[in-house]
Amino acid sequence: MAELAQIRNFSVIAHVDHGKTTLSDRLLETTGTVPLREMRDQLLDSMELEREHGITIKARAVRMAWREHELNLIDTPGHVDFTYEVSRSLAACEGAVLLVDASQGIEAQTLANAYLAVEQGLEVIPVINKIDLPNIDIDVVREELRTTLGFRDDEILLVSGKTGAGVNELLDAIVERVPPPVGDVAAPLRALIFDSHYDAYKGVVAHVRVVDGSLASHDRIRLMATERESELLELGVFVPDPRPIARLETGETGYVATGLKAVADCRVGDTLTLAARPARAPLPGYRPAKPMVFAGFYPSNAQDYPLLKDAMEKLRLNDASLIYEPETSQALGFGFRAGFLGLLHLEIVQERLEREYDLDLIATSPSVEYRVITQKGAEVPIDNPALLPDPGTIVEIREPWMKVTVIVPTTHVGPVMELAQTKRASLVDMSYVDPTRAMLKYDMALSEVIVDFYDQLKSSSRGYASLDYEFAEYRPADLVRLDILVSGTLVDALSIITHRERAQQSGRVLVNKLRGLIPKQMFDVRIQAAIGGKVIASETVKAKRKDVLAKCYGGDITRKRKLLEKQKEGKKRMKMVGSVEIPQEAFLAVLRIGDDT
Amino acid sequence: MIRGIGLYVHIPFCASRCPYCDFATAPATTALRDRYMETLSSEIVREGELLGHPRVRTLFFGGGTPSLLEPEEIARLGDALRSAFVLRPREVTLEANPATLDRARLEAWLALGLTRLSLGAQSFDPAGLRALGRTHQPDDSLSAFEVARAAGLDVNLDLIFGWPGQTIAGWERDLGIATALGPDHLSCYPLELRLDPDGSIPNWPGGGWPVLERWRRAASAAQPDDAGIARMYRVAERSLGHAGYRHYEIANWARPGKRSLHNLGYWRDRDWLGVGAGAHTHLAGARSANPVDLRAYISRIESGSPRAVDDDSDPPSEAAMLALRLDSGLDLGRYAARFGDLAAARVRGALREVEQVHLVQLKGRSARLTARGRLLASEVFVRLLP
C-alpha cells in the first residue's frame, strides 16, 4: 500500500499503430512487472478481435513499481467511437503520455484526445516514439507538438518501444511530472468506474479509480447512477494478471468483481460507493451510452432467430453501449434494431455475432437517428427509415451533424476537399500542424460520415489522412424517404432516408442493382424506386422463359429429382416479397453498396 | 409376382464420345467389351430367374450405341433374353447412330423381333452436327431412315435444338426435313449441358472431365438464351402439330397410335427392369441402379450383390411429376386411390399455386401442364417435392 504522494496514475494517448502496445509492454518489462521471459507480445490486448482491428476496445489498468513509486497505467480505447470511454479513462488519471510515431506525426484523433487530456487538467508528457526507424525527421514532429499543443522542445521525450531507448527517462518523467492524486482519505468512498467487463466466472468486473475514501474486500457496494447494490466478490489489481488484495485506498486503481450480472448495471462513468456509508454526490461526468448509428440485424436463416436473440443477450452482458430491441421486417422477418456508438462499434458487434456465435447475418444499411417535427408539434426520434411518418404529417426533419477534424498531408488537401464537397460538408477552418500537414475542420452530417466516408478519405489521401469527429447539433435538412417496391410491394428493409437532391441518383442505382440480383420469376417483376408514392426509377426483370429438364426416361428420374431438390434448397433461402422470390444475396449486396447509392 | 415388365438393355459402347452426353458410355474398342457382353447375358438370365420369368411387354435397347453391336453379339443377347423372359413384346426399339446401321446388323436385330428404330439424327444441318461434336453426316440419317423403312420398322427421329449458332430459321429447316421424311415419332430436346464436375463419366481414357467441361462451357456460352430456346420449342410445337404429330410428352411427338410404349411405361410409373451398366430399375415401387463404371458393374454381377437402391426416392412426388409430363396429365382421383387423400391434397395445393401463373390447368380431377407449363415444368415439379 502506497502513500498518496507515491502514486502516479497515467494513460497513454496514441493513434492506432503508433506503438502504444509495444511501449506499454516495454514499461511492464522495464519496471520488472513482467519478467522478460514471460513477455507475451501485446499483453494488454485481450480479445482476438481487438488484435485484428489493431485497437484496444476495453481499457484495463496495470500496476507497476518504479523507484519507490506505484505507477498505474490506465489503458484507453483507441477509436473515435469510444470518445466517452476515453474521457473516463483520462478522468481516472493525473497524467497522460502523448505518444506520436516519429514517422507518421500527430493524427487527428490523437490530437482530439490530447486536447481532452489538457481540458481535464492532466499533465501531458509528449513522447516521440519509434526513433529507431530510418529516414525519420524528428524535428518535424517536434514542430507539430509545438504548433498544435504548445509544448517546448525540452519537454519532449524520445523513445523507442522496440529497442527500449528512452524508456527509463520516460518512467522518471512520469514520476517527476505527473502530480500525485489528491483525495479525501476520510470521506465516504467515491470510486470512478472507467471500464467494466463481463467475466464468465466473476460476473461484472469494474475497473475503478478510488477518488475518496477506501474500499475493502468485504464491503457491500452501491452504484450511484444505476442505484444497484451488491456484495462485492473480489478486489484486486492487475500486475498485469489479476491479483486479489484486501483494500483499495484513495488514489489507487484496481478492479472490483461486483457480483452483478450485466455490464449495463455497472456503467462506465458511474460512481461506486459503499452501501453502508454512501457518498453524498457522485463524481461528475457520468453520461449514459448514447448510440449514434443504428442498423437492423436479421438472421439469414429465419430459424436462427432464437440463436441471434441469445447471442445478442450474451453480447449485451459485456457491452453496455450496445442497445437493441426486437424488430420485424416484412422482407427479412424477425430481427433486432440495434444502436451503436459508431460504425466501428457496429462492425465489431456484427463480426462477433458472426464469428463467436457462428451466425449468418443480414445487417441493414446503417442509419442515424433523425428527429422528425410533426404538425402536432411533437419531436419524434426515428432510427429506422421504414418508420418515417407520412410526409404530409412532417413539418421538418432534422439530422445529427458532427464536427469533423481531418489531418492530411498538404499534397492531398485537394482530393480530400473534393470528397468533403460530395458529402455535403462545410469547411469551418483550415490550419497547419506542420509545414507538410494541414488540419481541416468540417461540419458534416453524420449520415454522410457513416456511409463510407472513412474509406474514401483513406483512398483519396493514399492512406495518410486521419479522422476525428464529435457530435455537434441537430440541423434541419431536406430529407426524403426513398422506398424500393418489387412488383408493387414495398421492401421495408431497403428503404433509406436520403437528401432530396440525391434521391434520384440513389434510386436509379438501387433499382439497377436489384435488376441484376433478382432472378427471373414466372412473371415480369417490376422494380421501382419511389419517394412518397411517386416513382422516380423503374426496371423490369423479364419473366423466366424456360426451366425444364426435357429429357426424362428411366435412368433420369433419380437424377432429375436430385436437381429439383437442389433447386428447392435454393428457393428456401429466398425471401418472399409479395409473390416475388428474392435471394438473400440480393439483400446483402444491395445493403453493402453504401458507396454508389 | 411381376406380371409384365418393360425391359431396358444398356449397351454402353460408342465409336466416339459426344461431348454433351451424360449417359453411361464406353469406347467401342474397350478391352472389356466381351466381358461386358457376357456379364450382361448373365445378369439377364439371373434377373429372369429372380423375377419368375415374367413377360416382357416392351423391350428397349439403349446406349451408348447398341446399333454398333456385331451380329454374333446380338444373337447371344437374344439367346439370353429368350431364356430369361417370356419374350412376346408389343414393341422392340433400338437406338441407332445413323452411321452404324448396316444390313447385316439389321437382320440380326430383326431376328430378335425389332419393331422400331430410334435414330439419333440430331440435326440435318452439317453445322449443327459439327457444333454438337457428332461424327455422322446429314446423308447418313437419310439413308438409315430409308433402310429402316425398307425393313418395315417404325422410326423415331431424335433432334436437338438450341445448339451454338442455331437460328430459328435453321431449326425450322431441320423440322421441315424431318416432317418431310415422315417418321412415326419425333423426340426434340433442347441442348442441356450439365456443368457440374459430378458429370464426370468413367470408362473413357484421355482428357476426362476438364476437357469436357471446357467444351461445355464454351458451347453453353454460345447457345441461344432461354428466351431463344423457348421460341424454338414453340416453333416445334406449332410445326409438328401442323404436320399431324401429337405432342404427348414434354419432349415427344407421335403420329396416332405410334407413341413409344416403352417410354410410356416410365411416365406412367409402371414396372421396368434395366440391365447393363448404369441402367436403372423400378420394380414394386422401389428404384435401384447399376454402377456406371464398367468394372464396377461387372464385379457387382459377378459377386451377385444387389443393385444400389435409391433410398431418397419419393414415389408420390415422382409419380405426380412423371404423369404431368404427359399430355394426359395427372388424374388426381386415381392418384388419391394410389397414394392416399393427404398426398393428393398436397399435390392439388401445390398445383393451385402454379395454376395462378398459368403453368397448370386444373379441371375437376385432372391436372395438365399448359404450353407455358411445359417450358417451366421444373417450377411446377419443384413444388411437388416433399
Image (tube, rainbow, N blue to C red):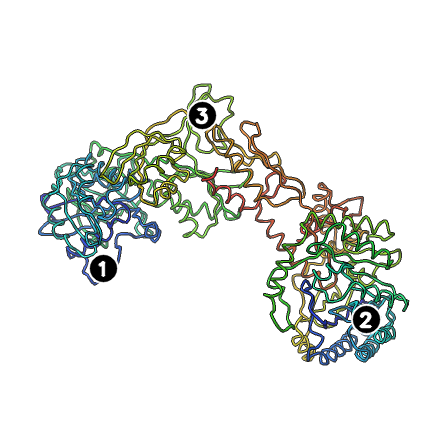
Amino acid type of the residue tagged 3 in the rendering: Asp
Q: Closer to the camera, B386 or A275?
A: B386
Chain letter for mark 2 = B
Q: How far apart are the alpha carbons under marks 2 and 3?
A: 80 Å
Chain letter for mark 1 = A
Q: Which mark lies nearer to you, 2 or 3? A: 2
Rendered image: mark on residue A265 = none
Amino acid type of the residue tagged 1 in the rendering: Met
In the shown orientation, is residue B361 left or right of residue A484? right
Of labels 3 and 1, earlier in sequence is: 1
* Label 3: element kind: loop
Q: Which mark lies nearer to you, 2 or 1? A: 2
Amino acid type of the residue tagged 2 in the rendering: Leu
Q: Is residue A50 above or below residue A267?
A: below
Q: Closer to the camera, A504 or A114?
A: A504
Q: Which residue is mark 2?
A: B101
Q: How far apart are the alpha carbons under marks 2 and 1?
A: 84 Å
Q: How far apart are the alpha carbons under marks 3 and 1?
A: 56 Å
Q: Which residue is mark 1?
A: A39
Q: Residue at x 46, y 50 (%)?
A: A359
Residue neighbourhood size for the residue with mark 1, other residues' Cα within 10 Å, grouped as few (<14), some (14–19), many (≥20): some
Chain letter for mark 3 = A
